[in-house]
Amino acid sequence: MILKSALVTLISMAFASGAQAADSRASTNKEIAIQSMTDVFVNRDLTGIERYFAEPYIQHRTDVGDGLVELRGFLANILKERPTFSTHIYRAISDGDMVMLHSVYVGSPRAEGELLAAFDLFRFKHGRIVEHWDALTLQGAPNLSGHSTVDGPAAIADLQKTEANRGMVTRFVDTVFVRRQVDRAGEFIDDKRYFEHALLGKDGMEAFKAKTRSNPKVGYKVHRILAEGNFVVVEAEAGGGTQVHYDLYRLQAGKVVEHWDVQSAVPPRSTWKNNHGPF
């Protein structure tokens, strides 16, 4: 199965990227993030909450309260209601005390069993997860160029270019999305090899320009930019804080060559179960 293979491959890549103890326990933040999701959602082992998370635990997902008791209750209900619920992780980006996972959730009650594309962002302290943000959307059909929301390369490369790539994407989103100078996209995107994974998207810089002009990111505000080698992820809001945007870019030779994203609506404030909100 392709999804299962992707998860096994990513776990293998993450564990090969750092030194491992003899008992093969997760040791880096990236490995811990992957293993925590695997234990809880794939192995359905809620004791992973005590192994990988710590108090005080801050939750930004608006339908879950703060604290590990709230987290355990939320996850227990999901696993009970959906015996086929699982996750398949495709990419992991680690930057300082933050790790972002790019995944697909299967059998989610939130989507009535449909596949959900997701970005989960974790903050670590002393090797434990202490804060979480996310954004999810229906995976949907392949886009106009035949790409899904998660397929494509996943291997981290060019670690020595991490800061240069972060700087390139920072300038790109400020120029094209904040200042709306869409005609300058060619300064940042490689037109000869730009692959688009967004729903309803299409490969190529001209298609990117047309889509951006017809659907501008109004009120776009960047909250953080994470980078590891050739991958850069941007967490932002749009629509005056009514939308959550996660954009993941792959760079090569100093230009953007691939893009994945998830956009989701922010629920009404009256429905939130914590005081933090999605940002």
Image (cartoon, rainbow, N blue to C red):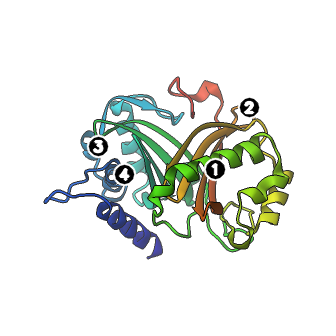
* Residue at (24, 58) in percent of width and height: 19
Q: Which mark is residue 140?
A: none
Residue 109 in view (yes/no): no
Badge 3 density bin: few <14, some 14–19, many ≥20, Cα 10 Å: many
Amino acid type indicated by mark 3: Tyr
Q: Pick the residue in front: 243 or 216.
A: 216
Q: Nearer the viewer, mark 3 or mark 4?
A: 4
* Residue at (30, 54) in percent of width and height: 39
Disc 4 element: helix
Q: Nearer the viewer, mark 1 or mark 4?
A: 1
Gap in Å between the C-alphas at discs 1 and 4? 22 Å
Gap in Å between the C-alphas at discs 2 and 3? 34 Å
Amino acid type indicated by mark 4: Lys
Report whether 42 appears left or right of 246.
left
Q: Which mark is residue 30?
A: 4
Q: Nearer the viewer, mark 2 or mark 1?
A: 1
Amino acid type indicated by mark 2: Gly
Whether tag 3 and tag 4 are in contact, CB under 8 A, the answer is no
In the rendering, at what x and y percent does residue 146 appear?
68, 74
Whether tag 2 and tag 1 are in contact, CB under 8 A, the answer is no
Earlier sequence position, callout 2 versus callout 1: 1
- To which residue does mark 2 refer? 240
Badge 2 density bin: few <14, some 14–19, many ≥20, Cα 10 Å: few
Earlier sequence position, callout 3 versus callout 4: 4
